[in-house]
Image: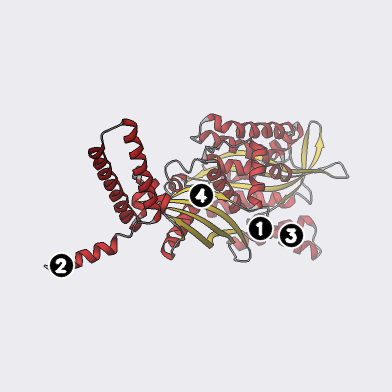
Amino acid sequence: MRSIENTIKESTEAFIPEATGEYERMMNETITELRARAEIKAAPGRVLWRALAAAAAVFAALIVTAAAVFAARPALAAEVPVVNDIVYAVSPNKTANEADCERIEALVMEVFQAFAVHDYDAAECCFSGDAMHTRDSYFAAAYTEQMQKWADVLPENADVGELEVSELSAQQKAFRYACRVTLTVLSRDGSYSRPEECVVRIWENAEGMHIESLQMQSERYAGFVQKYEESFGIVPEDGEHFGLIPFAYWCMIIDRVDSDDSARSREGAYNQMLRELDELSAPEENKAVFRSILLARLEQAQAEITPEMVSIEGLAEELMYRYWLGGITGEVSDFSDILEHNEDTDLFLWDAKFQAEALIPAVYGRFDTLTCLGSTLYDMSENPDGTITAHLSVNFEWTYSGNLTGVGDAVILTLRPEGKGFMVIGFDREIGDGIFNLTLKPAAQKYKAAGYSWQEAGEMAYEEALSQLG
């Protein structure tokens, strides 16, 4: 029995530390305050003094006991009223140990990975209460989006890859941690990296670690924030709706879209973005600034679409519709009213014959239905002889044997103005892995180089393509 008692005593003495000078100061101040209150009430001597002494002793005992318990597990004090302030006030600053740093690194990586995939619900689970809904956290998420795109800083042919923590330091004071973290953004091929520093404040309770604040530190980040607020206005201290972040990025680089793409392409892009914006669950007042930007750009793009462009797109749709119609009828359509048969259109007509009589029945079976989904004029230039060269995409959808499929034809048309419209006097395919580019065109060039006329070369190229299919 004596041995057990001694063990308990030794264990207790080892667990309960000596009261620090800070505890003694707090105890003395409390006793002095209690005495002062007693004098004001003019209570008679010894009885009140004994009561005050007893109360002070109990209070001191509570402080020492709390110190013993929460010094061992300061996180337990995080949510205990009054005690948490006491524990935090008297706790020393110290360097976080290796195990805590590993937990901090995992938490920081978890929140940035969630930002990277737009999983803002998962990111919020890493924060304390509503701590994610701040201006700094919103910009950290928006900057992560920008770092992923990285169009302004990545070297040529490099693509953004992943984030990793390369450096981390943390100071602990009771149940709070002040951390400085360096993230490294890596390109996929490993040829380029970029460091980004952030300051993170973490609060720990019995359930684990939670982020109280997160702020990026680099000059690049500061420039990003400045450009963002110049574009969309000041973000309030309680942040912005996180679902708008992808729109914010694209709207910030919208000038690149305007400078690189045609009016039709921009019109399509802005309409698509507006549809996506409508589908967001964010409040309308949060969408308003992005909607106004997109509508203004859409109006600008539509103003550039001239009747001439519309006429050219309509002609391209009609030309390619008749081309694919052979897949239903089995016969080459009549193109004479919209296309002049010459050396620059000859291979198109052989290709149309091939589609109608050979390739479609052999590969797909006959089309059941054919629908044109529209065309886009990407580029148009006027030639010295008054003709026009137009680069277009024409999209179709068809069904065969109950199956639905589609195709996008990227074509180059040479057009001669005639009356209120145009005549096609030249045809080429810009890209493609079909009969025209892979067989007809190189075969015809070979035969013409051998001295055959363009009419002979075209027919011989057709026979060669047909034999390859057979």
Q: Nearer the viewer, mark 4 or mark 3?
A: 4
Q: Nearer the viewer, residue 335 or 90?
A: 90
User: Which residue, given by chain and number where applicable, does mark 1 sit on?
Assistant: 154
Q: Disc 4 versus disc 3: distance between alpha carbons?
A: 55 Å
Q: Amino acid at mark 2?
A: Ile
State left or right for residue 465 relative to residue 328.
right
Crowd tier of the residue under label 1, counting other residues whose Cα lies within 10 Å: few below 14, some 14–19, many 20 or above: some
Q: Nearer the viewer, residue 161 or 463?
A: 161
Q: How much space separates mark 3 and mark 2, taking CA atoms?
A: 104 Å
Residue at label 3?
444
Residue at 15% across / 70% down in the picture? 3
Horizontally, is 351 left or right of 285 in the view? Answer: right
Viewer-nearest of labels 3 and 2? Answer: 2
Which image quadrant: the C terminus? bottom right
Between label 2 and label 4, give the one nearer the viewer: 2
Q: Earlier in the sequence, mark 2 or mark 1?
A: 2
The image shows residue 127 at horizontal and vertical percentages of: 44, 47
Sequence-wise first label, 1 or 3: 1
- Closest to the camera, between mark 1 and mark 3, is 1
Label 2 sits on a secondary structure element that is helix
Which residue is disc 4 drawn over? 115
The alpha-carbon separation of the residues under discs 2 and 1 comes to: 69 Å
In the displayed structure image, the side of residue 17 where residue 463 appears, left or right: right
User: Would you name the residue on which mark 2 appears?
Assistant: 4
